[in-house]
Amino acid sequence: MVALVLLPGLDGTGLLFANFAASFGPDVKITVVSYPTDTAIGYSELEPIARSFLPKDLPFFLLGESFSGPIAISIAASRPSGLLGLVLCCSFARSPRPSLAVFRPLLAVAPVAALPLALLSFFVLGRFSSPALRRSLAESLAQVSPSVLRARARAALLVDVSALLASVGVPVLYLRASEDRVVPESASQSVVALAPAAKVVEFQAPHFLLQVLPSQAAVVVREFMENRRGL
């Protein structure tokens, strides 16, 4: 058996992984990382929490979705025992929108909780939006303090783990969404520039790739795992 450790997006609850996780068979142990919902901390404080979920008795693959990509990269760069591969989904090694860094101070007072669900859906789901997906998005965000979401958004605007990505010693798979309105294509290009052997697979999907195409994404991830483990 092999494990797949899933690091969540900005909400940090891990709830949005449900359908993707269910797409794997019993020979893959799925571990879903979750972050505190009421403590506004950044990448350096969240990484030890993610590390506490790593299996100690199984070989494993690490998947960092969106916000968690830098954490997954940092963990992989430290070459923990048992790590076989790194998957980045709609994620980044450095801020995907560096031009927005000047607005970082405004995030301290941004009314995150008041943002219309329709606006959030436009960015993360786009034309793939559905009542069920919007409901899942609302339920996950409702569990997280607005101050926590603001802190994570500010951290993402300044993060840069490029040097660490260059030292990752395991195979890297990047899942890209062709209709991602949050993380641009330049993010995947940056990953490939730093890890030339990285494989990029593109899906016709929005930023919420794993939520819109859970089964299709799971097939690609499983193939990546099988090629390196022989499941």
Image: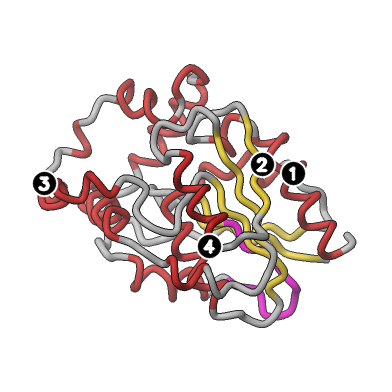
Measured as percent of width and height from the top left, residue 124 is found at 42, 31
Dot 2 or dot 3: first in sequence order is: 3
Say which of marks 2 and 3 sits in front.
2
Q: What amino acid type should be assigned to the residue bearing mark 2?
A: Val
Mark 2 touches mark 1? (CB < 8 Å): yes
Tell whether position 60 is magenta: yes
User: Residue drawn 72% across and 34% down?
Assistant: 216
Query: Which mark, residue 220?
Result: 1
Above or below, comparing residue 134 to residue 43 in the picture: above
Of all residues shown, which one is farthest toward the right? 230
For label 2, count other residues whose C-alpha is less than 10 Å away and answer few (under 14), some (14-19) or many (20+): some
Q: Quadrant of the rendered structure where residue 215 is?
A: top right
Query: Which mark, residue 106?
Result: 3
Tell whether position 228 is magenta: no
Dot 2 or dot 1: first in sequence order is: 2
Measured as percent of width and height from the top left, residue 196 is found at 62, 60
Is residue 192 visible in this depiction of the protein?
Answer: yes
Q: Which residue is mark 2?
A: 201
User: Residue drawn 33% across and 29% down?
Assistant: 120
Q: What amino acid type should be assigned to the residue bearing mark 3?
A: Leu
Dot 2 or dot 4: first in sequence order is: 4
Dot 1 or dot 4: first in sequence order is: 4
Measured as percent of width and height from the top left, residue 36 is found at 36, 61
Q: Which residue is mark 4?
A: 194
For label 1, count other residues whose C-alpha is less than 10 Å away and answer few (under 14), some (14-19) or many (20+): some
Gap between marks 2 and 1, in whole Å? 8 Å
Say which of marks 2 and 4 sits in front.
4
Gap between marks 4 and 3, in whole Å? 31 Å
Above or below, comparing residue 63 to residue 56 in the picture: above
For label 4, count other residues whose C-alpha is less than 10 Å away and answer few (under 14), some (14-19) or many (20+): some
Per the rendered image, the range of residues in magenta is: 54-63
